[in-house]
């Protein structure tokens, strides 16, 4: 089960994802992301993944489609605090480059 909270600090909104992101969470999360990215004062969606334990293919697809959609609004999607196992999955599929991710072991 996934728990989601958010903090709105224009020009960004931070979504804190806690738990396991599965297919059954996608519709609810997609709606929340869409509402946020259509707000005039929001130019960035930040997903805090520090407490995301697992993500399935539908969750990855949601992140990709959200990144594509928010680009149409001239905004950006940032994935932060990704767990090492999830980062390795993204890197293995070249999604680290697509999302502009860096390993937490790399210096800024």
Image (cartoon, rainbow, N blue to C red):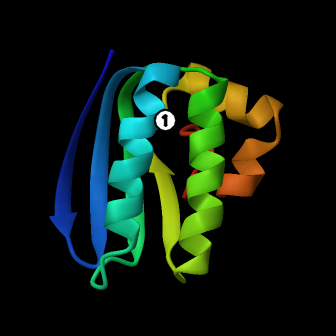
Which residue is rendered at x = 63% and y = 53% of the image? 65
Q: Is residue 31 above or below residue 68?
A: above
Q: Is residue 92 above or below residue 70?
A: above
Q: Is residue 46 visible?
A: yes
Q: Which residue is mark 1?
A: 82
State the residue in front, 10 or 91: 10
Q: In which quadrant will I find the C terminus? A: bottom right
Q: Is residue 22 visible?
A: no
**Image position of 45 (left or right of 97):** left
**Image position of 55 (left or right of 95):** left
State the residue in front, 46 or 66: 66
Which residue is rendered at x = 28% and y = 41% of the image? 16
Secondary-structure class at tag 1? loop
Q: In which quadrant will I find the N terminus? A: top left
Residue 55, quarter of the rendered image:
top right
* Whole-percent x, y for residue 57 in the image: 66, 25
Which residue is rendered at x = 50% and y = 77% of the image? 75
Q: Is residue 97 above or below residue 12?
A: above
Estimate how packed mark 1 is, as few (under 14), some (14 to 19) or many (20 or more) residues with alpha carbons within 10 Å: many
Residue 70, quarter of the rendered image:
bottom right
Which residue is rendered at x = 32% and y = 77% of the image? 42
State the residue in front, 47 or 29: 29
């Amino acid at each position: 089960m996934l728990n989601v909270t958010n903090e709105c600090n224009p020009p960004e909104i931070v979504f804190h994802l806690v738990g396991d992101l599965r297919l059954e969470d996608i519709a609810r999360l997609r709606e929340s992301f869409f509402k946020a990215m259509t707000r005039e004062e929001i130019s960035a969606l930040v997903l805090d993944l520090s407490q995301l334990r697992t993500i399935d293919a539908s969750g990855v697809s949601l992140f990709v489609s959200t990144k594509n959609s928010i680009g149409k609004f001239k905004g950006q999607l940032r994935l932060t605090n990704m767990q090492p196992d999830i980062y390795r999955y993204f890197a293995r599929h070249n999604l680290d480059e697509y999302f502009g991710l860096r390993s937490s072991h790399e210096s800024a």
